[in-house]
Every structure is written in C-alpha cells, then in structure tokens.
Image (tube, grey):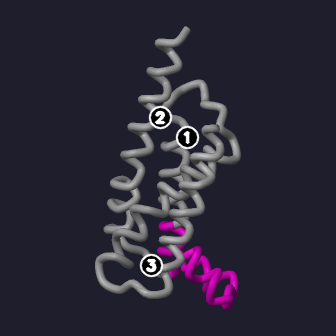
Amino acid sequence: MKRAVYGAASLLLLGIEILIGMYATGWVRNYLGDVLVVILLYTICRTISPKKPEKWFILPTAILVFAFIVEFLQLWGFCDRFGITNKLLRIIIGTGFSKVDLVSYVIGILPCYFVELLLSRKTDSGR
C-alpha cells in the first residue's frame, strides 16, 4: 500500500515538474521547481525501496547530498565539459549554479525528514 501512495505522489510531482519546466517562469520555475524536485526524488526512492533504512535520516540526507552534488556539478560546467547538447538532459542536469537552489533543496527536503521521523516513531512504537 505504501508503494502505491509513494508511486502516485511520484507521478503527480513528475507531472507538476514537467509543467513547471514547460510553462512556468519567475519564482515558480526558479524556486518551487527546486523545492519539489527533492521531494520527487524522495517519493521515487520510497516507491522503489519502501523498506525503511536503519536510521530515519539516511534517505533524506542522501537525497540532499545528491542534489548538492548535482548543483556543484553545474558550477563546474558538467554539461559543457562533457559535451551534453541534448536539451532535455541539459534541463534535467541543469547548467547554472545558484546558492538559492541549495536553499530550495534544503526547504524541500524538510518535509521528507518529517515523514521519515514520523514513520520511524510509528514503527518504534509498534514494537
């Protein structure tokens, strides 16, 4: 059942992200899209592997580290250095570093930490 909920959330968030990428401008594209992308990654991971990690904070932290790595690869010019010209790939990977994106990722991952904490407490109290 959990997988279905996370899967549905993933599809909904993916649809929203696609719409943001295609049509949005301003703060919605620049900030909300980055907030939602880490939540999307979280729901995808929970869909694929619904088993909770040993420590409740591991999955959200791993996703946040991944998002930071991708952002710093943008600073390094990853797409240009590796000759990535495909427009979709350049959008997915990103081509412009922003400190504000890092803040957006942190804001987006906070609800994921909260969900993981609640799930761990629910599981711990059920033992």
Q: Circle 3 — which element?
A: helix
**Residue type, mark 3 in image:** Ile
- Residue at image position (45%, 78%) is 20
Q: Residues within 10 Å of mark 2 (few under 14, many from 20)?
A: many
Q: Residues within 10 Å of mark 3 (few under 14, many from 20)?
A: some
Q: Which residues are magenta?
A: 71-95
The N terminus lies in quadrant = top right
| In front of the other: 120 or 54 | 120
Q: Which residue is mark 3?
A: 20
- Residue at image position (65%, 47%) is 47
- Residue at image position (50%, 86%) is 22
Please name which of the two marks, 1 or 2, marks the residue nearer to the observer: 2
Task: Pick whichever of labels 1 and 2 is earlier in the sequence.
Answer: 1
Q: Using residue 81 as the reference point, say whether residue 98 is left or right of it.
A: left
| In front of the other: 71 or 57 | 57
Q: Which residue is mark 2?
A: 116
Q: Using residue 9 as the reference point, say whether residue 28 is left or right of it.
A: left
**Residue type, mark 1 in image:** Leu
| In front of the other: 76 or 32 | 32
Question: Does 99 sit above or below residue 4?
Answer: below
Please name which of the two marks, 3 or 1, marks the residue nearer to the observer: 3
**Residue type, mark 2 in image:** Glu
Question: Does 41 sit above or below residue 85?
Answer: above
Task: Pick whichever of labels 3 and 2 is earlier in the sequence.
Answer: 3
Look at the image and say whether residue 64 sits in the magenta stretch.
no
The C terminus lies in quadrant = top right
Give the CA distance from mark 3 to mark 1.
25 Å
**Where does the image place residue 78, in percent across and percent down from the top left?**
60, 77
**Where does the image place residue 119, in percent across and percent down from the top left?**
48, 29
Q: Residues within 10 Å of mark 1 (few under 14, many from 20)?
A: some
Q: Using residue 111 as the reference point, say whether residue 11 is left or right of it.
A: right
Q: Which residue is mark 1?
A: 59
